[in-house]
Image: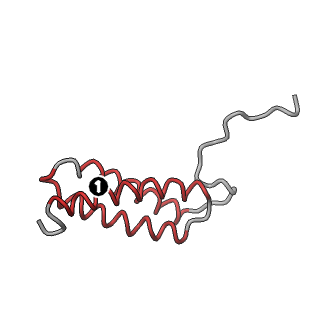
C-alpha cells in the first residue's frame, strides 16, 4: 500500500532532519555525568565523585539547554540535568567538593 503508516518513528535526537553534532555531544556528556553523579551519590564516601560530576553535569546540561535545537534534546537534557543536580546536592550534603 502506498499509504502505510509507520508505527514507530526512529529514535533520534535529530527530529528536524538536520545533524547536530555539538548539541548531541553535550547531551551525551550530560547523560554520562548525570548517571555517574546520581549513582555515586548513594554512597556517602563517594562524595567527591558525585559532587564534581554533578557540578560538571549541571554546567554541561545548562549549556546544552542554551544551545539545544530540538525538543528531544531538551527532554533528555532535563532528565539528565535533574540526575546531575540530585547527585551534586547529595554529594555536597555528604562532604562537599573538597572532602
Circle 1 Cα neighbour tier, 10 Å, few/some/many (<14 / 14–19 / ≥20): many
Q: Is residue 8 left or right of residue 30?
A: right
Locate the N terminus by quadrant: top right
Quadrant position of residue 98: bottom left
Q: Give 31 or 43, whichever is nearer the viewer.
A: 43
Residue drawn at the location 36% of the way across and 63% of the way down? 57
Q: Which residue is mark 1?
A: 37
The residue furthest top is: 1
Q: Position of residue 51 (x, y in %)?
A: 24, 62
**Residue 54 sits above or below residue 13 on the image:** below
Q: Position of residue 13 (x, y in %)?
A: 58, 53
Quadrant position of residue 52: bottom left
Q: Is residue 38 left or right of residue 17?
A: left
Locate the C terminus by quadrant: bottom left
Residue drawn at the location 59% of the way across and 48% of the way down? 12
Residue drawn at the location 52% of the way across and 59% of the way down? 24
**Residue 25 sits above or below residue 44 on the image:** below
Residue drawn at the location 30% of the way across and 51% of the way down? 38
Disc 1 is placed on an element classified as helix
Q: Position of residue 58 (x, y in %)?
A: 37, 65
**Residue 24 sits above or below residue 62 on the image:** above
Q: Position of residue 66 (x, y in %)?
A: 52, 71
**Residue 58 sits above or below residue 33 on the image:** below
Amino acid at each position: 500500500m502506498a499509504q502505510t503508516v509507520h508505527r514507530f518513528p526512529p529514535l533520534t535526537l535529530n527530529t528536524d532532519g538536520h545533524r547536530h553534532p555539538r548539541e548531541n555531544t553535550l547531551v551525551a556528556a550530560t547523560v554520562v555525568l548525570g548517571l555517574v553523579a546520581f549513582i555515586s551519590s548513594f554512597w556517602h564516601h563517594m562524595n567527591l565523585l558525585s559532587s564534581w560530576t554533578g557540578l560538571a553535569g549541571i554546567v554541561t546540561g545548562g549549556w546544552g539547554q542554551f544551545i539545544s535545537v530540538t525538543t528531544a534534546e531538551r527532554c533528555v537534557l532535563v532528565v539528565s540535568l535533574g540526575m546531575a543536580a540530585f547527585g551534586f546536592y547529595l554529594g555536597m550534603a555528604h562532604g562537599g567538593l573538597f572532602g
